[in-house]
Amino acid sequence: MFSFSKWKANIYTKYSKDPGNMLVHTGVIGWILSSAAQVFAIVFNDKISPEQKMFLIPQEIADGGVNILSFYAFTSGIKYIGAKLTKTCKLRTAELSKLLKERGLILEKGEPRVKGKVYAGDWDFDITKLKNYKRDFEGTFKPFNNGAEVIAGLTGSIISSNLITPVARNYYASKRQKDMIASMKKGEQPSDSIPPLQRISINNFANNAYSKMIRPSGNLKV
C-alpha cells in the first residue's frame, strides 16, 4: 500500500545525500512537463487541422526530446566536473587542507613525492575512498561537497536552459525545416497537408496557434 510519508522519507534520504542531483532531476521534470504541455496544446486546439496535427505533434515530441537530452547531458556533465574537483581535493576549504596536511596527504612545495603514493590534488585521489574518511574527513568534507555540487548543478542548469538547450533546439528545428522544404520540392508530400513554413518555429507556432490554450515560454527558467 502506498504511503505518502514513506515516499517523502525516501525522497529526503536520497536527495539529502546528493542535493545536486535534485536540481538536475527537477530540471528534467520541468522540461518534460513543459514539452507535454505543448503537445497537449496542439492535440486539444480545435483551430489546428488534423493534417497539421499529424505534422506538428511528432515535431513537438522530437523537439522536447532534444530539450531534455541537451539539458540533462550538459547539467550532469557540469555537476560531475564539480564533484570530481572536490573529491580529488583540487578544490578544498582551508579547514580541509589543514586536516589533509596533518595526515601527510598534501605534497608541500619542494617535498619529494613518495613513489606510489597518491596526494590530495592528484586526479586519481578520492578523499571518500580513504580508510579513515568517515572518522576524520566526512564531517568537514560532506557539507563543502554538497554545497559545491549544488552550485555546479545550478550553474549548469542556468547555462543549459538559457544557452545550450535553445541552441540545440533551434538547430534541430532549422534542420527539420530544411528537410521539409526539400521534401516539398521533391513532391514527396502534398503541400496542403503541411502547415505554413512560418509556423514551423516553436515560437511562431506558440504566438499564432495557442489562442485558446497555454502560451509556453521559449526557455525553461531555473
Image (cartoon, rainbow, N blue to C red):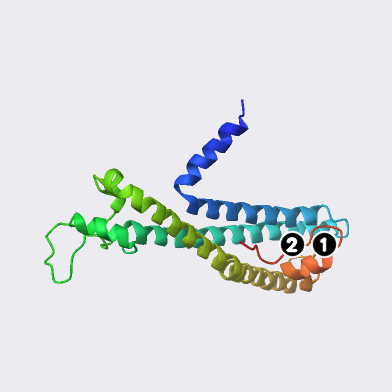
Pick the residue in front: 95 or 115: 95
- Location of residue 120 in the rendering, given as x and y in whole percent from the top left corner: 25, 60
Amino acid type, residue under disc 2 in the picture: Pro
**Quadrant of residue 221 in the image?**
bottom right
Left/right of residue 169 with respect to residue 24 in the rendered view: right
The residue that mark 1 highlights is 210
Q: Position of residue 172 (x, y in %)?
A: 62, 68
* Label 2 residue SS: loop
Q: Is residue 72 in view from this perspective?
A: yes
2 or 1: tag closer to the N-terminus? 1
Along the line of sight, which residue is nearer the eye, 162 or 18?
Answer: 18
The structure residue drawn at horizontal position 41% and vertical position 61%, both measured from the top left corner, is: 82
Q: Position of residue 103 (x, y in %)?
A: 19, 54
Q: Can you tell which of label 2 and label 1 is closer to the viewer?
A: 2
Single out the residue that lies furthest toward the top: 1
The residue labelled by disc 2 is 216
Instruction: Point out the image quarter for the N terminus.
Output: top right
